[in-house]
Image (spheres, helix red, strand yellow):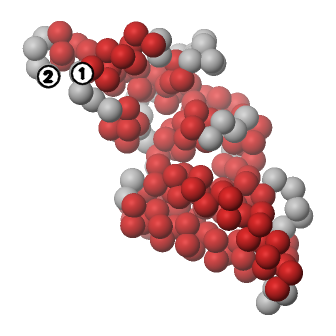
Amino acid sequence: MLTRRDREKFERLTLRYLDSAYSLALWIMKDPTEAEDVVQTAYMKAFENFSNFEGKNAGGWILTIVRNCAFNLYKKKKNSSNLISFDEVAHSGDSTDENSIFNFSPEEILAYVSMGKNMMESIEKLPVEFREILFLREIEGYSYKEIAEITGVASGTVMSRLSRARNGLRKIFTEYKRQEQAGGM
């Protein structure tokens, strides 16, 4: 059991990441109630194991625990051993503009919003591993190295998943645009 001082230190170091933890859980689970359960479980596990925390990068540490809890629940929920399902050809290609969110131009984003579709709907269509990487990179602003530490995958895999996620969003956007031009939206 932690001392009062350790409990206060735990709260000081980890509670500031509560919103990020919930957002990550929500991006993975796509259900607010399940996301809340994941965060609660993760914070309980973090509290129980706080004596093992080395004091470096509390945000990365807590988000790693949240991620692991979310994937455990997600796997149980989906009863699937292969969470990534995508067409390698359709999602291949490289991202060239790291400074543009999701690699879209402002005109593309404006056109997308004007079509009445929101970006979250498109992101939710992506496999969970891609949503997770997009969230950590584009929303939370973590570096590739930090994302690799949080997710437990190599930096090259992080970059590959991010590129595939961006290309997947571009494909969804292009389909919406095509449907709009055809009068289908």
**In terms of image quadrants, where is residue 58?**
bottom right
Q: Say what amino acid the circle numbered 1 marks.
A: Met
Residue under label 1, please give it: 115
Q: Residue at x 59, y 52 (%)?
A: 20
> What is the number of callouts on the image?
2
- Taking depth in this image into account, of 70 and 40 the one nearest to the observer is 40
Which type of secondary structure does the marked residue at label 2 adopt? loop
Locate the N terminus by quadrant. bottom right
Label placed on residue 185: 2
- Taking depth in this image into account, of 56 and 93 the one nearest to the observer is 56
- Taking depth in this image into account, of 94 and 79 the one nearest to the observer is 94
Residue 124 appearing in the image: yes
Label placed on residue 162: none
Residue 152 position within the rendered picture, expressed as x and y whole percent measured from the top left: 70, 50
Crowding around mark 1 (Cα neighbors within 10 Å: few <14, some 14 to 19, many 20+) is few
Locate the C terminus by quadrant. top left
- Taking depth in this image into account, of 24 and 144 the one nearest to the observer is 24
Q: Residue at x 57, y 74 (%)?
A: 41
